[in-house]
Image (cartoon, rainbow, N blue to C red):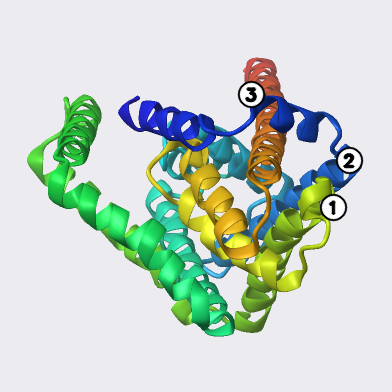
Amino acid sequence: MGFLFLGFLLLWYVTKDHDREKIIHEMLNANYWWVILSMLVGIISHIFRTLRWNLMISSLGFNTKTSVTFYALMIGYLFNIVVPRLGEITRCGILQRTSKVPFSILFGTVLSERFFDMICLIVLISITILLQLSFLADFLDKYICHPLMERFENNYIIFIIAFCAVILLIIIVYKFLKKRFRKTTPGKRMSWLKMQIKGMVSGVNTIRYMRKKWTFLFYTFMIWFNYFLMVYLCFFAIEGTLHLGLTEGVTVLSLGSLGIVAPVPGGIGTYHFIVIKTLTELYNITPEAAVSYAYIAHASQILMLLIAGLFSLVMISLIRKKTSYFKNNMNNNEKKNNDRSK
C-alpha cells in the first residue's frame, strides 16, 4: 500500500502544474482506434511470452497447454497491478494446479525469464543512449540517477517500507511452511526443501541447456518488438505526438520500462513521470500532449490487462470445474463397476 500511495502521489505531482482543461481536451480528441490497435498488439506480445514460457517448460520435460499457460500468465499480470511481483508467484501456482508441473520448476523458469528480460532492457537502454548520446546521458543523470541517489541519501522512508515488506514476506513464508509441515518429521521437511531448491535450479538453468535457443530468441524479439509497437502506435492517437518517429518510440519504450519495473503497482506515477519528462525535455512536446500521451498509453495497457486477466480467471475456473466434474464421473463409474463385479 505504501508503494501504491507513493505512485499516486507522484502521479499528482507530475500533473499538478499543467493546464487540466487542455489535457482533458487532448484526451477527448484523441484517436482511440490507434489505442485499441495498441491494446491488441499488447495481447500479441503476451501470446509470444506464453509461447516462450511454454518452450522453457517443455525443455524440462513437462507439457502444458498454450491456452492454460496464457490464462495463468494474464492472471499473474492482473495480480501484479495490485501488488508488484505477486503475479510471478500467482501464475506459477495456477499452472501448477492445472498442469501438475512442480511449482519450484515453474518459479525457476520465471526467474530465468525475468533475468533475461532485464538483460534485454539493459541492451535496449544502452543502444538508445548510444544513438542519442549528446543529450540523453544528461537527461538520465538529471531526472533518474541523481533523484534516486538523493532520495536514498536523504530519505529513510524507502528503507523503512522495504524493511517492512521483507518482514511481511518472511512472516507469510513462515506461516505457509508451518501450516504445510505441521504433521511432518524434520527429515521429510529437509527432503522437501532440497527437492524445491533442485527444481528451482533446474528452472533457472533452462535457457542454458535449451535446445531450441533460436526459437527462444525469436519469441523474445517478437515480445519486445510488440512492446515497441504498443508505444509507437499511441503516438498517432495524440495530435501533439503525431510527428514522432521510430527513434523516439525506442527511447520512450526503454526509459518508460524503467517506470514499469519500479516497485510501484502497475508503474503508476513512475511511468508517467519518466515518459512525460522524456517527451517534454528531449523532444519538446507540449506538457499537455505529453501528459495526455502518458495517461492514454498507460491506462490502455492497464485496461487490456484487466480485461484479459478477468477473462482468464473465468476460463481457469471453468477448466478446473470441468476437470473436477470428469474426475468425479470417473470415480463414480469405477465404484459402479466394482459393485457390479462383487
Reply above or below: 278 against 127: above
- Which is more foreground, mark 3 or mark 2? 2
Q: CA distance from mark 1 to mark 3?
A: 48 Å
Q: Which residue is mark 3?
A: 324
Q: For the residue marked with disc 1, what is the amino acid?
A: Phe
The percent position of residue 301, horizontal first and vertical second, equals: 68, 41
Q: Residue furthest left?
A: 186
Callout 2: few (<14), some (14-19), or many (20+) C-alpha neighbours within 10 Å?
Answer: some
Q: Which residue is mark 1?
A: 236
Q: Which mark is residue 193?
A: none
The percent position of residue 191, horizontal first and vertical second, equals: 19, 51
295 or 184, nearer to the observer: 295
Ranked by sequence position, the earlier of labels 1 and 2 is 2
- SS for tag 1? loop
Q: Residue at x 37, y 52 (%)?
A: 104
Asked if labels 2 and 3 touch by Cβ distance under 8 angstroms, the answer is: no
- SS for tag 3? helix
The percent position of residue 144, horizontal first and vertical second, equals: 38, 58
**On the rendered structure, is 106 left or right of 251?**
left
304 or 310, nearer to the observer: 304
Q: For the residue marked with disc 3, what is the amino acid?
A: Ser
Callout 1: few (<14), some (14-19), or many (20+) C-alpha neighbours within 10 Å?
Answer: many
Ranked by sequence position, the earlier of labels 3 and 2 is 2
For the N terminus, give its image quadrant.
Answer: top left
Q: Which residue is mark 2?
A: 31
Q: CA distance from mark 1 to mark 2?
A: 7 Å
Q: CA distance from mark 3 to mark 2?
A: 46 Å
Asked if labels 3 and 1 touch by Cβ distance under 8 angstroms, the answer is: no
Reply above or below: 140 against 264: below
